[in-house]
Image (cartoon, rainbow, N blue to C red):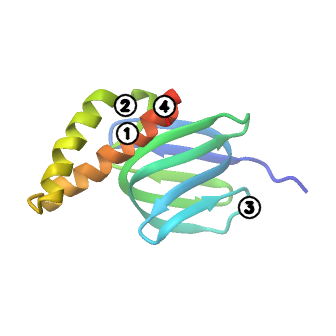
Amino acid sequence: MDRPPLQVEVVSATRVVWSGEAVNVIARTVNGDIGILPGHEPLLALLVPSVVDIVTADGRSEAIVVDGGFISVDHGRVSLLSQHAQLGHEVGLEQARKDAAELEVLALNGNASDDQLHHLRLLQAQIKAGEKATGEQ
């Protein structure tokens, strides 16, 4: 028996970043990666800065950057809530790579603050999403 597609919504503090039907959502939680398919059991989990991969009902793939937050799954609805979220094609790859390189030097030398390390993880997710969106993988 085919199940109806998931109703997915990715929301940041300022806007609805993506909303639509999906057949698969992969997100990174504090406990590791999780895949959500239609019929998934209810879930509430903390997200880490990462890329959320969504396979839409029509077979397209969306890569969305989240800066942590929450994922909720209940009765075929998936909600991802994050302070900051953006679509992969919205990422300025050149600037993200430059900023990440600078922070990586600090991190390798042990001179990066917790905020800088968090920002580095977000930049790395932005780069990954941007590369997926542009096919630069």
Cβ–Cβ under 8 Å for marks 1 and 4: no
The quadrant of the picture occupied by the N terminus is bottom right
Determine the residue positioned at 39% across, 35% down. Answer: 15
- Closer to the chain start, of discs 4 and 2, is 2
Determine the residue positioned at 31% across, 48% down. Answer: 122
Q: How many labels does the image show?
A: 4
Mark 4, other Cα within 10 Å: few <14 / some 14–19 / many ≥20: few
Q: Name the residue under label 2.
A: 91
Q: Is residue 45 above or below residue 64?
A: below
Kindly report the distance in space between the C-alpha atoms of the residues bearing marks 4 and 3: 33 Å
Quarter holding residue 57: top right
Q: Mark 3 points at which residue?
A: 39
Kindly report the distance in space between the C-alpha atoms of the residues bearing marks 1 and 2: 7 Å
- Closer to the chain start, of discs 1 and 4, is 1
Cβ–Cβ under 8 Å for marks 1 and 2: yes
Determine the residue positioned at 41% across, 52% down. Answer: 50
Callout 4: helix, strand or loop?
A: loop
Q: Mark 1 points at which residue?
A: 127
Q: Is residue 53 above or below residue 19?
A: below
Which of the two discs, 4 and 2, sits closer to the camera?
4
Residue 14 seen in render: yes
Find residue 119 and report its horizontal and vertical position in percent: 23, 50
Cβ–Cβ under 8 Å for marks 1 and 3: no
Which of the two discs, 1 and 4, sits closer to the camera?
4
Which of the two discs, 4 and 3, sits closer to the camera?
4
- Closer to the chain start, of discs 1 and 3, is 3
Q: Which amino acid does label 3 sit on?
A: Gly
Q: Name the residue under label 4.
A: 136
Find residue 102 and report its horizontal and vertical position in percent: 16, 43
Left or right: 78 as drawn, with respect to 130: right
Cβ–Cβ under 8 Å for marks 4 and 2: no
